[in-house]
Amino acid sequence: MGIKTKNIFLLMAAVIISFSFVSALHAEPFKSPSFGGATGLISTPTSHTGWEGAGFGIDVAYHYIDANDDVNDDGYSIPLVLLHLGVAGSNLEIGFAYDDQPDRAADDETDDMLISAKWEFTEGLAIGGNAQLMNLNTGIDGDERNDFQVYLAATYPGNFFSMPAETTIVIGHTFIDDEYNDDDNENIDFSMGFDLDFAPQLFKHYVHWISDFANYSYSTEPGGANSDNRGAFNTGLRFALMRDKQFKLNLDLIITDALDENRDWAAGAAFGMSL
């Protein structure tokens, strides 16, 4: 990584840290796992954990991503489990996701496992990362690999046309274990996400509009939009079907890569409870 790249990284990190001094708006029922497993929007993790302030919480979720670019038009299924631990006033979460990918020709073992962790060490600011176990049991030499991502996330509140909203900025880096993609290891991950309490007077705080723009996807071999070496805009609605202090039930309807011909749709549901 050159000096110029390092300076850009440090400058963006300083901007993110400055946002951490603004207290974040809490919307507990809408804190659902993102595609990659961490609590967040679509591709973008937020600084939040699933059950802030709780001693222990668990979210179980499932996402389906359509894949109209696949020869068999098969979709990607992502079941996941997200655990939240409140330790000494801090918020820590650990997530496990399994990316069940469609078969590719004679290779039916291209699935991936995503293991994530995030620590919200102060309100509105978190550090996190994930390990991506790619192409499990593929049997093809050099096809299996382990990729890793680390990031810093800042989430801060605001208003958009008098509607409560949150903005998230993420900066990080993905380490790709692939000798044919050395150039990718020079890239910086960046995304900006937006969570809007949509028309609260009409929908009574049961509907949020979520969007993000990211130059990375939930994994290095994702379903749906692949924003490798470019940016992708994802958007959709998140419905809170259950709003309770101990339980949540959310439904996501998403358009991935909405501004490009590669656009696809995705849907997901998450159930959670705290102790």
Image (cartoon, helix red, strand yellow):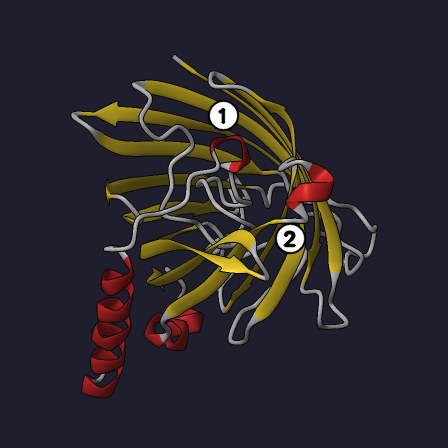
Report if the CB atoms under discs 1 and 2 are less than 8 Å apart: no
> Residue 169: image x %, image y %?
39, 62
SS for callout 2:
loop
Q: Amino acid at mark 2?
A: Gly
Q: Nearer the viewer, residue 53 or 268?
A: 53
> Which residue in the structure is indicated by mark 1?
59
Q: Which of the image's four quarters has the N terminus?
A: bottom left
Residue positioned 23% across, 87% down in the render? 4
> Which residue in the structure is indicated by mark 2?
223
> Residue 246: image x %, image y %?
47, 16
Quarter assignment of residue 79: top right
* Residue 76 in sight from this viewpoint: no
Residue 11: image tag: none
> Residue 253: image x %, image y %?
72, 44
Front disc: 1 or 2 = 1
- Horizontally, residue 41 falls left or right of residue 175, namely right
SS for callout 1:
strand
Work out which residue is located at the far right of the displayed protein and give it: 72
> Residue 261: image x %, image y %?
77, 72
Q: Amino acid at mark 1?
A: Asp
Q: Nearer the viewer, residue 178 or 165?
A: 165
Work out which residue is located at the far top of the displayed protein and give it: 275
Q: Is residue 107 above or below residue 171?
A: above
Precedes in sequence: disc 1 or disc 2: 1
Residue positioned 77% across, 61% down in the render? 69
Q: Is residue 56 above or below residue 92?
A: above
